Amino acid sequence: MQKKNVETSDDGRYIVVDGRKWRATDPLVPEETAAELRRHLMAARRAVRDALKQEDAEAERRARARVQLAKTALGERGAAWWEQSKAERQQRWEEGLKRLEEG
């Protein structure tokens, strides 16, 4: 697999992957927590893939909701992390991880 070219915007708010701009992960998320959230994200993406293969609309809906939850907890979706207070940011990733772990 070829490594993608990833650049970070000067303000650190965005990454650019192969010319496409994406919101960066909130840099305040502790690395261990971010790694756990990424594990949940990748598992949810695999579940989307599997649901699509099986043509299971309900499983796809649940998996996509988990992708959204993980991306939001990481700060990559939802309210912009740079517009939130430190406490709001911490609450976002802690609640997101808790909900993902509860299943």
Image (spheres, rainbow, N blue to C red):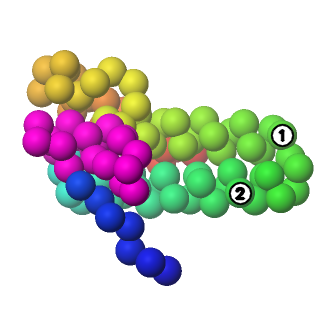
| Residue at the image position 49 percent from the left and 52 percent from the top | 41
| Residue at the image position 48 percent from the left and 54 percent from the top | 40
Does the magenta portion include 70? no
Report the side of 30 relative to 68 (left or right).
left
Q: In this view, does 75 lie above or below 44?
A: above
User: Which amino acid is tagged 1?
Assistant: Ala
Query: Range of the magenta residues?
Result: 8-27
Question: Where is residue 69 shown, x and y percent of the image?
Answer: 48, 36
Q: Is residue 66 above or below residue 36?
A: above
Residue density around tag 2, few if under 14, some if 14–19, many if 20 or more, within 10 Å: some
| Residue at the image position 56 percent from the left and 41 percent from the top | 66
Pointer 1 or 2: first along the chain: 2
Circle 2: element type? helix
- Residue beneath disc 1: 57
**Residue 66 or residue 12, whichever sits in front:** 12
Could you say which quadrant of the image residue 81 lies in?
top left
Does the magenta portion include 20? yes
- Residue beneath disc 2: 49
